[in-house]
Amino acid sequence: MKKPDFDAVLNALRTVNDPDLKRDLVTLGMIRDLKVFEDGKVAFRIVLTTPACPLKEQIKSDAERAVRTVEGVKVTEIVMDAEVRRNGKAGAGALAEKGIPGVTHIIAVSSGKGGVGKSTVSVNLATSLALEGAKVGLLDADIYGPNIPTMMGVTENPKLFVDPEKGEMFVPPSSHGVKVMSMGFLIQGDQPVIWRGPMLHNILNQFCTKVEWGELDYLVLDLPPGTGDVQLSLAQMLPMTGAVIVTTPQEISLQDVRKALNMWEKVKVPALGVVENMSWFTADDGKQYRIFGEGGGELLAKKFNTRVLEKMPLVPAVREGGDEGKPIVIRQPESEAATLFRSLARKVAQEVAIRAADEAAAPSLQIGNFQST
């Protein structure tokens, strides 16, 4: 039996492209710990750019097919892994140059319009990314209307500890695999937050510098409606990877959302895509009703040179899950809405990975040692 040639195996893997990144797995540094054995076995890891990669099975099967064309290969052992890579782009402010320690990507969920289901998208996006195996945090930046603790079912407050260098720090509680921080933890019951701009900026700065997030692949920001102090402060403070834009189909929503997209363009935060929420309602007889019209998401995406990531139905169970603190992806994981939210998370991760690959050099190839058995 002829032992497979190591270089031949590596060259075979150079013919396999990541469908999103349009480059081969070897050049991208995705092939790790490649080993070739005397009995014809070839073993290696494929390290994807996100655990939420929607094409992982295709990449694995393409790699296996390529390796099996090499003379002498009898068995392939492929381990699928993931490593979320940082992109090189940062925002405008002093904090933006440093980011948040341990946080790889910051994703804003924005609308410019109230009542479009932005927070619902935020909690289900964050929870879906966690279900895919990512390390995720969720920052409720809606200081005046902090609903995320209720929607995530968080029943404990952040813990406090004193760091010798940073001073007093918050440790965010977790729910459904997501670390959560919110103004809702710092106020009592129905107490209103009556603050002007400088106070808002100060609390946001504390959320960025006084919260011990640990290692996160993605920090999702649930932003308030509008294009005001919160959005501008965070755009200056944080190196955001991009913004997910939430709208409903009708023109009255699109008017405000267009303003939000223009704002993100001005502060150089790219739009990852559009989520058209409340796109349809399915009645008991199975008939679909487009209560808020249709086509608005496509018009918005076309105007701003992005894409519709997903269209979401208007479903009572989604609202009920928010009230109960169980996002629909947890409450009814097999439902249509949950399936669409899981798809949305994979597409957002896909967009983030593409941008990171375009801006950062691939890590050095780690192919292990030539081994015989």
Image (cartoon, rainbow, N blue to C red):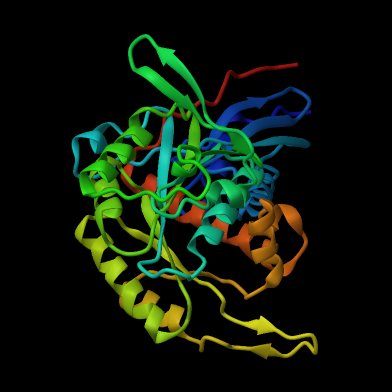
Q: Position of residue 371 (x, y in %)?
A: 66, 17
Residue found at the far top of this picture: 164
Residue toward you, 16 or 19 = 19
**Side of 258 where 127 appears, left or right:** right
Q: Position of residue 7 (x, y in %)?
A: 55, 32
Residue toward you, 281 or 13 = 281
Residue 295: tell me if it is visible.
Answer: yes
**Side of 135 where 145 appears, left or right:** left
Q: Residue at x 61, y 48 (%)?
A: 152
**Side of 220 where 72 appears, left or right:** right
Residue 17: tell me if it is visible.
Answer: no
**Side of 86 where 20 appears, left or right:** right
Q: Position of residue 123 (x, y in %)?
A: 56, 53
Where 365 sits versus 204, above or below?
above
Residue toward you, 205 or 311 = 205
Residue toward you, 5 or 351 = 351
Q: Residue at x 52, y 55 (%)?
A: 122
Q: Position of residue 312 (x, y in %)?
A: 59, 72
Would you identify the image quadrant in which residue 251 lies? Answer: bottom left
Where 140 sits versus 365, above or below?
below
